Amino acid sequence: MIRLRNVPLRLDEPEDMLADKAADKLKTRVISVKIARKAVDARRKSDVHFVYTLDVAVRDEASALARCRDAAPAPKNDYASPVPTRMPEDRPIVVGFGPAGMFAALALALAGLRPIVLERGEDAGRRSAKVERLRREGVLDPESNIQFGEGGAGAFSDGKLSTGVKDRRIPWVLEQLTAAGASVDIIYDAKPHIGTDMLPGICANIRRRIEALGGEVRFSTRLDGLETAHGRLTGAVAGGSTLPCSRLILACGHSARDTFEMLCKLIPMAPKPFAMGVRIEHLQADTDRAQYGPLAGHPALPPADYALAAELPDGRRCYTFCMCPGGEVVPAASEHGMVCTNGASPSKRNYGNSNAALLAALSPEDFPYDGILGGVQWQRELERRAYEAAGGGYRAPAQTVGSFLRGGPSRFGRVTPSYGPGVTAIDLHNILPPIITGTLAGALPIFDRKLRGFAAADAVLTGPETRSSSPVRMLRTDALQSPAVAGLYPCGEGAGWAGGIMSAAVDGLRCAEALIGSLEA
């Protein structure tokens, strides 16, 4: 196969024309064509179009490759989940059933190791009801919410699968997701996503596959402790009993703060840079016009997104993250009396607003609290302050961009805040520290020059956004084990080794591979 890049297609042209376009570029007859990548090229607003990368079969590959500079041999994806040559005496344990834990457990199950998964939250169905109750009624279950439960935090987000990570495991992960019910276009879309309406069911299907392979998922079961002897793991304490265990993948997620507190007494950890800020909302129609120009609203185009970053004159950095076209701002609290936000979109991305995290990058030197968990303590302080200022009930503080930048009252206009259980108009400068508000205020005009209307006076800021990534890192060796406890594999976002669904899934696979490899030692 030949990998052919830069094949354009007008918005009104059907994909059936791709074979002819490939033949024209390669100057030879094409036997078959498969889409490897599809993206929107909106650099020129007068000529917004699609651009494809294709895997093409031809009779004479050598001649075609010589004639076209956009052609190269198609890469081979030969990743397969490893299989051990011997079985361990005890079943491996996976803690957490978010993307990292889920794919670690799947790999272990495919290897015949019958993993036991401990997940503090509930299954997708029960969890969905708890998430909806928080959104509608302001009633929080601290053990089953947007952070905890089947699928992890990613299950109630936009389900974005784009990542800066380059890894041979990514196509395999996408294949498992499509086998579980995701649309096949995630395999080739340049910015793949699944949608919060689809993710819970897909996660449940992967769990059923793990169970069919002999694995076990124990919901409402939190890891309460670890037992060790002579520097090696011997057991996991959960549900009031101790499970014998010599190998455990710890994928607890970035919001398992009580788990962090337990672990920092047992294994080496360190504070790590992360980011905090707010969610910014615009009308999706405005975002479409800013990105697509006169072609905004064309039925062939997806809802527009963006990714912005800036370094301010004082060296502070600000960026957008987890942009959700056609979505809503959602409550992401996991502890009583605290408020934080996240973003979500359904698979069709057909809600009226777009939203994204607007974040100030922070380093441990910025933290007002010392110690390994200084970042966690800071998160809690801001979330508690927001809860109290907004009047309780898990309402969130919100402010228009115009009010945030120039003062005066917030009068919500064209952009209606989408956050449930509701917002309270508050000056965010009274909740967030100057190191954050100053960075956001400095970046907004810069982003407005990059994306027209980004700093529109009626855009809405809802906060705080505190859970963009883990504020701690659990140290690990080249064998991906804790240097203090052999057999313990810190994994994924919570351990500080991933940032997003795909990178977490990849890290879960890497830890599963390392665990399987340890059986050969």
Image (spheres, grey):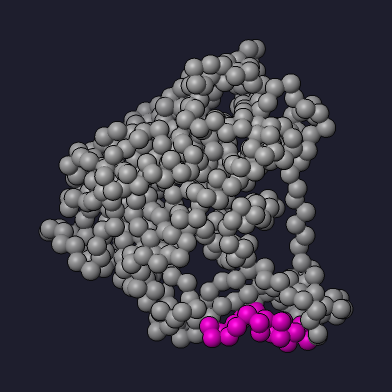
Residue 319 visible in the snapshot: no
Camera-side residue of 140 and 329: 140
Q: Residue at x 16, y 59 (%)?
A: 410
Residue 211, percent across and down?
64, 37
Viewer-nearest residue: 495 or 11? 11
Quarter placement of the C terminus:
top right
**Farthest left residue?**
408
Q: Residue at x 77, y 76 (%)?
A: 32
Q: Position of residue 155 (x, y in %)?
A: 48, 48
Counting from the top left corner in percent of width and height, residue 309 is at 42, 59
Quarter where residue 401 is shown: bottom left
Point 28% across, 48% down: residue: 136
Residue at 28 percent across and 51 percent down: it is 420
Q: Where the N terminus falls, by quadrant?
A: bottom right
Instruction: Residue 166 in the image: state x and y as whole percent.
Output: 64, 54
As drawn, 17 above or below 491: below
Q: Is residue 503 magenta?
A: no
Q: Is residue 58 left or right of residue 285?
A: right
Q: Is residue 25 magenta?
A: yes
User: Which region shows up in magenta?
Assistant: 7-27
- Position of 459 with respect to 345 (left or right) is left
- Please state if 450 lies on the left or on the right of 429 as rendered: right
Rendering quarter of residue 189: bottom right
Q: Classify 55 as above or below 417.
A: below
Q: Is residue 516 above or below residue 228?
A: below
Does the image show residue 38? yes
